[in-house]
Amino acid sequence: QAMLVRSATGAAVRAAWVCGSPRISVAAPGKLQRSSCSFESGHQAKTLPSWRELLGDATRDRQELLRRLEEQGQLVQKIAAESAQMRSRLEYLDKEVRMLSTKLEDSGATCRQRVNRKGVKGRGGQSRMSYRPTLEIAERQPTHVCELGHQTLAQLAILGSHPARRERLLREIMCVEGVSWGEAHKTLVKIDEHIERCYWLESLPYRVGITLAVLGAFAGVLLVFCKPIAYSYGTQVAGEELPEGVEDISELTVNQVGTWTWSWMEPMIGVASFVLLCCQFTRAQATKMNMKTYAEVLLAWRADRAAKKFPNYDRSMVRSWAKHMPRVGLNFFPIYERDAGFKGPTSGL
């Protein structure tokens, strides 16, 4: 309280001095006479405010100062937060610029060196083949689809590249599961096992067609040119007899046997060819009408089953990867992707 009284006294003295008073009446130290302090400025004497009023003014000034200090503190914190956010953005942009420069260097767009060929003048059309890759460029060329960027993979996937679609699905699994590229193959194996459960049923029409086509080709050749088979079929099924003057089929050459059997084989082969031609024409017209064929319906069914079983991953990526039948070896058995390992199916790289 004594400090406040002294402050009020000092304020009163300064106020009197500013107003031009030559005389100030002040009480003893520590006590201030109420309404007794006055000053004369050559006009009318004015009474100084009491110490309570000065104390109230000082308190209000202090509160206003604290409020302003608090506002400035909040402003400083806001500026610090914006500065940190701006710093993180700058770091992100720096990282992106570095990645972009690395990609440009890998593609050779910024580091191609010109090698002058003998006998070539200037930089015309004859010198366009004078660019030669350096050892650094050769070391950076990709050897697997996993080394390609997102944009390149997306473009290849749109063009129908199955290895590119496979790599996109692997990266989707990495993002969803939070695992490494190698661990993502385990989930890919699970998806592959699910969609290949009905593989043999799905591929049955193709296998039956291939078998019948191969058997029909061999049977047609044998029925036309093979003497024992042609004679047995001609006499017992077709009801034909040997040509005049021929007592045994062995007397005929292979070409003569073909001429003899062609009289009943031609209608069967011709009708079969016409049926296949009509089927092929029907399929071509259906394709022009944008009608789905059996293969497209089958692949769409496989893709829908995979997307429904694994809804956590992007539906378009799962469906585009599942629209693919596994390769088949010479032994007529499929080569599943889970058996291909990290390298995956042949990508051409």
Image: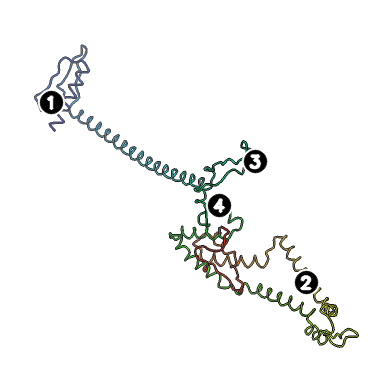
Question: In front: mark 2 or mark 1?
Answer: 2
Three-letter amino acid code at the position of disc 4? Thr
Contact (Cβ within 8 Å) of mark 1 with mark 3: no
Query: What residue does disc 1 label?
Result: 32
Disc 2 versus disc 1: distance between alpha carbons? 126 Å
Which of these two is toward me, 48 or 4?
A: 4
Q: Residue at x 46, y 45 (%)?
A: 96
**Above or below — where is 84 with respect to 209?**
above
Query: What residue does disc 3 label?
Result: 126
The x and y percentages for residue 140 are 50, 51
Query: What residue does disc 4 label?
Result: 152
Which of these two is toward me, 150 or 289?
A: 150
Query: What residue does disc 2 label?
Result: 275
Q: Residue furthest front?
A: 118
Three-letter amino acid code at the position of disc 1? Leu
| Residue at disc 2, secondary structure | helix
